[in-house]
Every structure is written in C-alpha cells, then in structure tokens.
C-alpha cells in the first residue's frame, strides 16, 4: 500500500468487510539482547472479530501487542495490518503509517495514559489532529465518538481527573476509535474497573467491533473477562502460542495442560473444575536438560516425548485448516485428558538421560 493510500485510509475509509483479514502475525520474534521474549508467534485477527490473547505476567502478551503497534523492536518475522507489512516500513512511510492510526492501543490504566491537563474534547480529537484531519471536521467527529461510547457531550470540557474510572476508560475508547482504526489492541481494558463498568466496557467493545468492522485484540490474564465476548482465544506461554481456537472450544475443552490450568483456575463452584485444578497442580513430570517443551517443568504429564519442542497442531480428527482451527502445542494433546481424574497415574517412564524435577517453584 502506498503512503498516500495509508494516509487516506484513516478516518474516511469504508467500513471493512466483516471477516476480512485485519492483522496477520507470522513467525514473529522479539529479542532483547540474549533474552527471547517472543519466539515464532503466528496469529490472525479479522474485521469484526474479538481475539482474546491470554497469558500470565511475563508470557509476552504485552510485548506482542506493542510489536504490532510498532512500539517494540521486531527481531524476525512479519506483521501485516490491513494488507501492509509493517515490518518493512521505515522513515517517512513508517511515520505516515503511525499517524494514520490504523492500529490503536488502549492502555490498561487510562489515568496514566490520558494527559491530565487536556480536556476530553482535546484528548479525543488528538488522533484526528495528528492525522491531519481539518479542524472544522474534528468537532463533529469527537462528538460522534463520545456518543458511540455512551458519554454525554457535556463531559467534553472536563479533564480526566474530573471523571470516574469508567468514564475515563470510555474516553480512552473514544480516542481509540475516533480515527476509524482497523485494529484495536486493548491491554487489560477492564482490569482496573468495578463489575458494573467492566460489563459496560466489554459490551461497548462487542458493539463497536460490529458497527465499525473493527478487529479487536483483548489482552488479558483473566479468562473470565474473555469468556463472554471473545470469538477466538490464543494462549501465550513464555513467548509462544501454546493453543488457539474458537473461544468456546478453548474454554470448555482445552488441548494444552496450561490452558486447562487457566480454565480450571477461574473462580466458580464447579467441583469437576476444582478436581482438575488439583491434578494440574501436581508436581511436574520430567524434562530433559537443555530444551523441549517450555511448560514441562510445571506439567504433570511431561515425559520422554516432551524432549522435543512441540509445534502447534490440530486436535486429532480435526482437519479443516485456517484460523478457526483448534490447535495446541503439546505432544500429549490427544491423550493427557484421559489421565486427568483421580486415581490415574499421570506420569510415564522417563529415560536415564532425563532429569526428574519433582518440586519446581510455581
Ligand atoms: S508437550 Fe509434554 S510437557 Fe509440554 S504440555 Fe504437553 S505433555 Fe506437558
């Protein structure tokens, strides 16, 4: 896509067709010195879709979002947004792409991300000013964005300090959508909100992705906040996607023991879930020094097969390729679940070359 096309795609382009590719991440690597933060990540998000990206602290999910937004250095791989390979843009083309605002990042804490001295009108209008939208057009666009997120235009003259937490997050959302981006990266968008505001913001994201044909990546450490709205879920562990697929499948029938641990850890009275959680927190099986599956030191099902790094692959019997395919990076994804009930042994014999790590810190 040319620079002119990139610039003109902001703010006035037609609503993208629902289901069209908005983001494609291929074999993405991010390294800081000798530390690999992301190692070969593949991901896709489509217009009108909410992709949930889940992982614990340090899994690399924020680095992944920052790399897509151009805020973290890419060591290898490709990031394509709305047909443009962002990893090949440099200099003027990169600056133009950034100003166009095709990708918007919504931060976890709006109090920190919003300039406390600017009014709501200025904050929401800023992306339009940066993109070169004429001043006369900005006012109506700001009012429209505030209306879309359910904020009264009377709040436009206030500063962030004079707003509630929920209102601030909606200002951040209005600012993110005012330039009609193709992709919204929402980093823990509801973790700082109370239950009522949390539901409100999640419902807004759900509505806006349809109205604007927006692809939304919701980053979270909490499966519960993804359960109601995500179409698909990708699970990140130590810089690698270990499972992805339709949200219902990942939540109800995870293929990777780590995803199962996350699902079982969600609050709730379900006794089966609690029993699964107990077993998944069993001491680890065995790993071979120097490599293999990155989850092996925590996995009760680790055995000799886990010496080799597992690649993302489909569940047994699932053959349809594409982003809707349910895949996991686990050698035992077809069979570990059969061992997941009380009374069954969860370990298999380990060869002499392996080291048994019985009580790794968790
Ligand atoms: S590959 Fe082995 S160690 Fe890794 S998650 Fe699967 S069973 Fe556990």
Image (cartoon, rainbow, N blue to C red):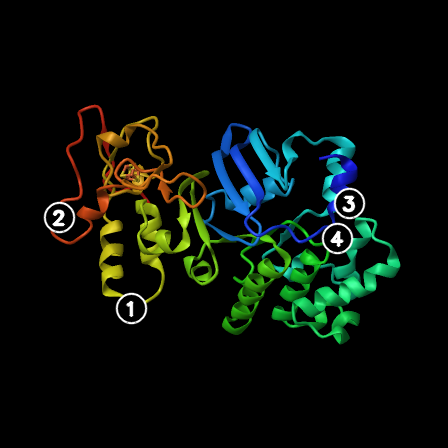
Which of the two discs, 4 and 1, labels the residue nearer the N terminus? Answer: 4
CA distance for labels 4 and 1: 47 Å
Q: Secondary structure at mark 3?
A: helix
Estimate how packed mark 3 is, as few (under 14), some (14 to 19) or many (20 or more) residues with alpha carbons within 10 Å.
Answer: few
Label 2 residue near ligand 1, CB within 8 Å: no
Rendered position, 153 above or below 86? below
Compared across the picture, whether 353 is left or right of 93 comes to: left
Mark seen at residue 344: 2
Task: Let me know if residue 362 appears in the view.
Answer: no
Across and down, in percent, residue 145 comes to 71, 64
Disc 3: which residue: 8
Across and down, in percent, residue 1 comes to 71, 35
Picture quarter with ligand 1: top left
CA distance for labels 4 and 2: 58 Å
Which of the two discs, 2 and 3, labels the residue nearer the N terminus? Answer: 3
Rendered position, 240 above or below 324? above
Q: Residue furthest left?
A: 343
Estimate how packed mark 1 is, as few (under 14), some (14 to 19) or many (20 or more) residues with alpha carbons within 10 Å.
Answer: few
Mark seen at residue 269: 1
Compared across the picture, whether 204 is left or right of 265 comes to: right
CA distance for labels 2 and 1: 24 Å
CA distance for labels 2 and 3: 61 Å
Give the residue at x 34% y 32%.
310
Q: Secondary structure at mark 1?
A: loop
Give the residue at x 54% y 67%.
203
Task: Let me know if residue 115 appears in the view.
Answer: yes
Give the residue at x 63% y 43%.
69
Q: Residue furthest top?
A: 353
Q: Secondary structure at mark 2?
A: loop
């Amino acid at each position: 896509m040319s620079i002119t096309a990139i610039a003109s795609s902001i703010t006035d382009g037609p609503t993208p067709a629902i289901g069209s590719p908005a983001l494609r991440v291929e074999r993405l690597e991010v390294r800081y010195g000798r530390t690999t933060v992301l190692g070969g990540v593949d991901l896709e998000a489509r217009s009108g879709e909410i992709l949930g990206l889940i992982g614990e602290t340090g899994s690399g999910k924020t680095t992944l979002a920052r790399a897509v937004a151009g805020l973290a250095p890419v060591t290898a791989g490709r990031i394509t947004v709305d047909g443009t390979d962002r990893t090949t843009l440099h200099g003027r083309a990169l600056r133009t792409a950034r100003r166009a605002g095709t990708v918007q990042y919504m931060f976890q804490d709006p109090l920190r991300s919003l300039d406390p001295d600017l009014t709501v009108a200025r904050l929401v209008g800023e992306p339009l000013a940066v993109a070169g939208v004429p001043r006369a057009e900005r006012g109506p666009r700001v009012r429209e964005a505030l209306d879309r997120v359910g904020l009264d235009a009377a709040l436009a003259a206030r500063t962030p300090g004079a707003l509630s937490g929920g209102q601030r997050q909606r200002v951040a959302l209005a600012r993110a959508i005012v330039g009609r981006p193709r992709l919204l990266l929402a980093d823990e968008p509801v973790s700082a909100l109370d239950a009522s505001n949390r539901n409100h913001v999640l419902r807004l994201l759900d509505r806006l992705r349809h109205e604007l044909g927006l692809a939304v990546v919701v980053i979270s450490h909490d499966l519960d906040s993804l359960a109601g709205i995500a179409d698909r879920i990708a699970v990140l562990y130590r810089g690698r996607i270990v499972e992805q697929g339709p949200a219902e499948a990942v939540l109800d029938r995870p293929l990777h023991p780590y995803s199962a641990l996350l699902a079982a850890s969600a609050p709730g009275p379900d006794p089966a879930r609690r029993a699964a959680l107990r077993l998944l927190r069993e001491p680890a099986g065995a790993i071979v020094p120097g490599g293999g599956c990155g989850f092996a030191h925590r996995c009760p099902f680790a055995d000799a097969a886990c010496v080799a790094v597992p690649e993302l692959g489909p569940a047994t019997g699932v053959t349809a390729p594409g982003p809707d395919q349910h895949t996991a990076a686990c050698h035992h994804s077809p069979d570990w679940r059969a061992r997941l009930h009380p009374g069954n042994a969860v370990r298999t014999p380990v060869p002499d070359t392996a080291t048994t790590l019985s009580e790794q810190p968790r």
